[in-house]
Amino acid sequence: MEKVLNQAEMLAEAILESQEYITMRLAEQAAMRDENATQLIASYSEKRQAVESLLADANMDHGALAKAGQELQEVERAIDECEVLNKMREANDAFNAMMKKVNSIIRYVVTGEEEQEEGCSGSCSTCSGCH
């Protein structure tokens, strides 16, 4: 077991040294230092909470819900246009893709099974797509 744990530690260190991880952390730090980005994230959380509260109310005010929904969409558009947040999202996506590949390799080596595509049950008898 000690060998496995040592190898896991080496893998973790390699992940921390990867360009994907470093880029992700730098992008997160840049977003946290960016006043506009932090205000947008705070505003999004506030607007989302307002929508959720209105949806949970048994006597929902549909006009207030429509207004709150519109405000939430406006903040989402602003977030989509924020370069710092876009860079952070792209860096997170790249890191997650790397981690998915790492997990897929481990799964394949340990189980001999390749990762199934989304929507695939793994049963070829019920599939008409890949025969």
Image: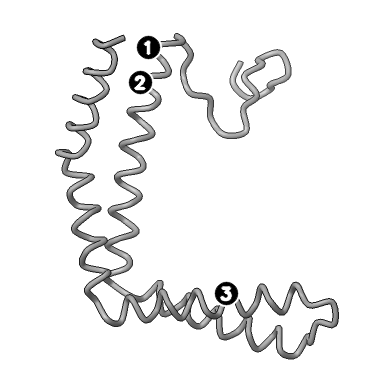
Front disc: 2 or 3: 3
> Is label 2 in contact with label 1 (beta carbons under 8 Å)?
yes
Q: Are marks 1 and 3 in contact (CB under 8 Å)?
A: no
Label of residue 109 in the image: 1
Q: Which numbered circle lies on residue 79?
A: none
Residue that mark 2 sits on: 105
Q: Left or right of 29: which side holds 43?
A: right
SS under mark 1: helix
Mark 2 or mark 3: whose residue is earlier in sequence: 3
Q: Which residue is drawn at 43% across and 77% down?
A: 42
The amino acid type of the residue labelled 2 equals Ile
Where is residue 5 drawn, in percent x and y? 27, 18
33 vs 68, nearest the viewer: 33
Q: Nearer the viewer, residue 6 or 83?
A: 6
Picture coordinates of residue 65, whole percent (x, y): 71, 83
Q: Which residue lies furthest to the right in this view?
A: 59
First in sequence: mark 1 or mark 3?
3
Which is nearer the eye, 127 or 58?
A: 58
**Residue 89 percent location from the top left of the image:** 34, 59
Amino acid type at mark 1: Val
Q: In which quarter of the image is residue 50?
A: bottom right
Q: Is residue 67 above or below residue 17?
A: below
Q: What element carries label 2?
A: helix
C-alpha span from label 2 to label 1: 6 Å
Looking at the image, residue 52 sits to the left or right of residue 20; the answer is: right
Q: In this view, does 66 lie above or below 96?
A: below
Determine which of the numbered discs, if any, sits on residue 48 in the image: 3
